[in-house]
Image: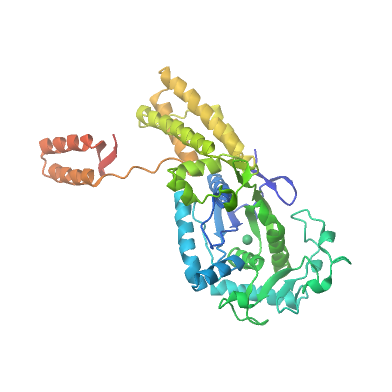
Amino acid sequence: MALQFFDTRTRQLEEFRPLDPAGRGVKMYTCGPTVYNHAHIGNFRAYIFEDLLQRWLEYRGYKVERVMNLTDVDDKTIRGCREAGVPLAEFTQPYKDAFFDDLKTLRIEAATHFPNATDDRHIERMIAMIAQLIESGIAYQADDGSVYFRIGKFPRYGQLAHLDLDELRPSGRVQNDEYEKESIGDFALWKAWTEADGDVAWESPWGRGRPGWHIECSAMATGLLGPRLDIHCGAVDNIFPHHEAEIAQSESCTGETFVRHWLHCAHLIVDGQKMAKSAGNFFTLRDLLERGWSGREIRYALLAIHYRQQLNFTFDGLAAARAALARIDAWVGRLKVAGSEEPSDFTMPAQAAFDECLDDDLNISGALGHLFTIIRESNAAHDADSLAPADARALLGWWGRIDQTLAIFPDPEPVPREALDLVERREAARKARDWAASDALRDQIAALGWQVKDTPTGQQLSPA
Ligand SMILES: [Zn+2]
């Protein structure tokens, strides 16, 4: 089966057709966090979906160049730094650092680029794009000093979200003097400085101010990846107006189709309810770690539901993730014990089915179902003594390959300092051809729970 994804614009499954089929390169843009607080698990649901997408494309031989931006200037970050009484950059930095730590905890692959909206080169590009839009009559400066995108000048506006634009056009019922904008749907490209902005401002041909959120993404996406992207992702609440605006701005500037495939993931709810601080069901990753859940357990719980399905996050769900991982760990442990050195070419039908599921719009729940079929059947074969060591080794190799995508296997245990010291002493004993000492040291290492193996490249340690 060809790789296919559900496209937000066409509302149907579309075969993945990269812009550069020969080169296997894929350009992907994913809207990143607004760094005014710690990201919550709903945010991470989207980032984990995007991580699965990237990893599966890589498994299929594509080379993904991904941008994930950091929104470090907008209403919320400005409000936050004003309340904290510190400069904007000082306010956002700890949240940026925390975000990168969280990505590591959840084993989310680093993007190729993590641009900051406030970097000079991106601010310059935003200003250049806005100037171009004004020049071509698509944008205008209103009486309030801000610059707006004239949505009436972009006939495709609303196509991604399947919106009826008439609802956004001015009508007799809208008092025009309530709006400085020409049309209620026009969105800000450049926001003129107001007192609430404090010292957060950049100079522009339209006076002091700051960019709108939408132009930030258009400028960083086209600046880093070029005018055309293969894939743009986000959560469903990014579709309108954010992604609609990104299309309008980018395509009006470049004259090219901005994005070939649009993918969006559904919401996360907690215990059947919308996550909200007031409801007491609002969790950051840190909250869950403090309650004793591990990064891989949280990753599994957020990963295991198809991205287009609403994910109902519960502590029972986390416990189920813990149990699923324990089953996988036990299975891998058995394969390791049984596996001989050379794998056979043994495969099970569910392995191909696993791949087909992920090719089919990242059907992860289906794929995991096949993984557990394999676990059940190979455990049964093992119990019946009918799993050949070379076949166990082959299954282990397959697991290693698919875990490049799932990224759920535990990190290797760190070797304790004491064992490393003993290995060093054993190295010296072996150089001195003191075999008795070497054997004694091997026993001491074993007593610490580690196995030492002598190989042509030296001693190798593994958990016993
Ligand atoms: Zn964005």
Residue 221 lies in quadrant: bottom right
The extreme top residue here reads 384
Which quarter holds ligand 1?
A: bottom right
Rendered residue at 82%/56% (across/down) = 164
**Is 31 left or right of 137, judged from the image as shown?**
left
Q: Quadrant of the N terminus?
A: top right
Q: Above or below — where is 220 with respect to 422?
A: below
Q: Quadrant of the C terminus?
A: top left
Q: Position of residue 263 (x, y in %)?
A: 66, 50
Can residue 350 be seen by looking at this rendering?
Answer: yes
**Is 344 left or right of 62, judged from the image as shown?**
left
The number of discs equals 0
Can residue 386 be seen by looking at this rendering?
Answer: no
Rendered residue at 89%/67% (across/down) = 172
Rendered residue at 74%/55% (across/down) = 160
Q: Above or below — where is 141 with respect to 159?
A: below
Rendered residue at 63%/54% (across/down) = 234
Q: Above or below — where is 294 with respect to 393?
A: below
Residue 444 lies in quadrant: top left
Q: Position of residue 443 (x, y in %)?
A: 18, 34
Q: Position of residue 376 (x, y in %)?
A: 49, 25
* Closer to us: 276 or 210: 276
Q: Position of residue 62 (x, y in %)?
A: 56, 50
**Is 371 left or right of 434, judged from the image as shown?**
right
**Colour mapping used in the image:** rainbow
Residue 455 lies in quadrant: top left
